Amino acid sequence: MSRSRPNRSGSRDGAMILEALNFAATWAVSSRRRAGEINSSVRLWARARRCARDWASHETKCKAFIRTNMPERGGVAAVLGSGLLRDVPVEDLARAFREVRLFDLQHLASVRLRARTKGMTNLRFVQRDLAEGLGFLRDDPEIGLVISANLLSQLGVAADRNGADAAAVIAGHLEGLRAAPGRRLLLTDVGFGIVLKDGSVAERHDLMHGVALPEPTETWPWPVSPYGEMDPGYKAVHDVVAIGL
Ligand SMILES: C[S@@+](CC[C@H](N)C(=O)[O-])C[C@H]1O[C@@H](n2cnc3c(N)ncnc32)[C@H](O)[C@@H]1O
């Protein structure tokens, strides 16, 4: 009997089955059963897998910035927008800190499982809407490091979509970070350009809604949507900043 290779629609079906399983498993374990949020995390997970090669340099740079700027050891490290744990050096954090508190709307079952199989028992997954502010960090003397991990632009996008004041939400997050104890690191995309096949930039968008950020330590491009992801004719390249606050 000859074994046939999976064709493109076969691998698409396979990917859809994995996404459905991840959704169902996350629904089962999440303390925050909101289908829209879980679905959005599953879509991010699927996209990150599709775009892994294009996102690799961005993820490496994020991790390197955190490694260089994190304290050698401490009580609690808080990661805001921890999501898929792709852009944070979670194993280094788990070694250096007694507890690593991971905050996001949702944490997928696949992410929790990977952490468990790597033996990281001091990770705490917290489901929380960070658009509601960071006041909860302020009074925790055990926190030695706070990392805002590619979350800030998302808060602005969601506020804009809901008709709220995106600039106020962004400024509020910055204020909350500055008031948090310990070392504070901010990683975020601040804008993006739509780049056509001939290399020309057709559009530019400000993801900070006019809010000024402190001078970054480093900046780099992140091809969030390579050619073909949204449209074969263009790609979206985001501008990322890394800042110690
Ligand atoms: C670009 S992803 C960052 C990914 C993540 N740092 C990683 O390493 O994979 C943005 C993350 O912010 C989370 N997020 C968006 N809005 C949020 C909110 N209001 N509260 C908490 N997390 C939120 C999303 O669920 C997503 O995981």
Image (tube, grey):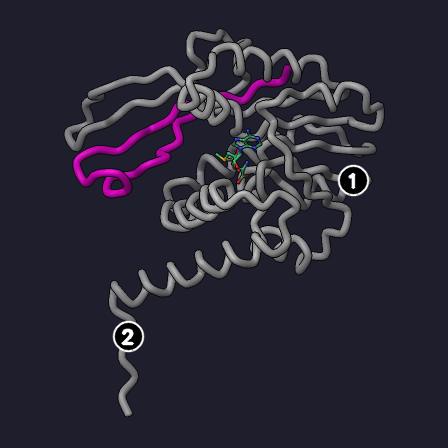
Q: Position of residue 21 (x, y in %)?
A: 49, 61
Q: In the figure, residue 100 lies in which quadrant?
A: top right
- Judge from the rendering whether residue 89 lies leftward or rightward of residue 228; answer left or right: right
Quadrant holding the N terminus: bottom left
Q: Residues within 10 Å of mark 1 (few under 14, many from 20)?
A: many
Q: Residue furthest bottom?
A: 1
- Identify the residue at horizontal 73%, vertical 43% (top origin): 124
**Circle 2 sits in a helix, a strand or a loop, which is it?**
loop
- Whether the magenta-drawn stretch holds residue 226 is answered as yes
Which residue is pictured at 78% across the width and 38% down the height? 97
Q: Position of residue 12 (x, y in %)?
A: 31, 60
Q: Residue at x 18, y 29 (%)?
A: 196
Query: In terms of depth relative to the viewer, which is nearer, 66 or 176?
Result: 176
**Residue 240 visible, this orientation:** no
- x, y percent for residue 131: 57, 23
Task: Check disc 1 and report the residue beneath it.
Answer: 99
Residue under label 2, please give it.
5
Q: Quadrant of residue 242?
A: top right
Check disc 1 and give the amino acid type: Glu
Q: Up-down: is 137 above or below 211? A: below
**Residue found 15% across the figure and 29% down from its top:** 198
Q: For residue 143, what is the image quadrant? A: top right
* Rendered image: mark on residue 53: none
Q: Amino acid at mark 2?
A: Arg
The magenta-colored residue range is 220-245
Q: Is residue 202 left or right of residue 229?
A: left
Local packing at callout 2 (Cα closer than 10 Å; few below 14, some 14-19, many 20+) is few
The earlier-in-sequence mark between 1 and 2 is 2
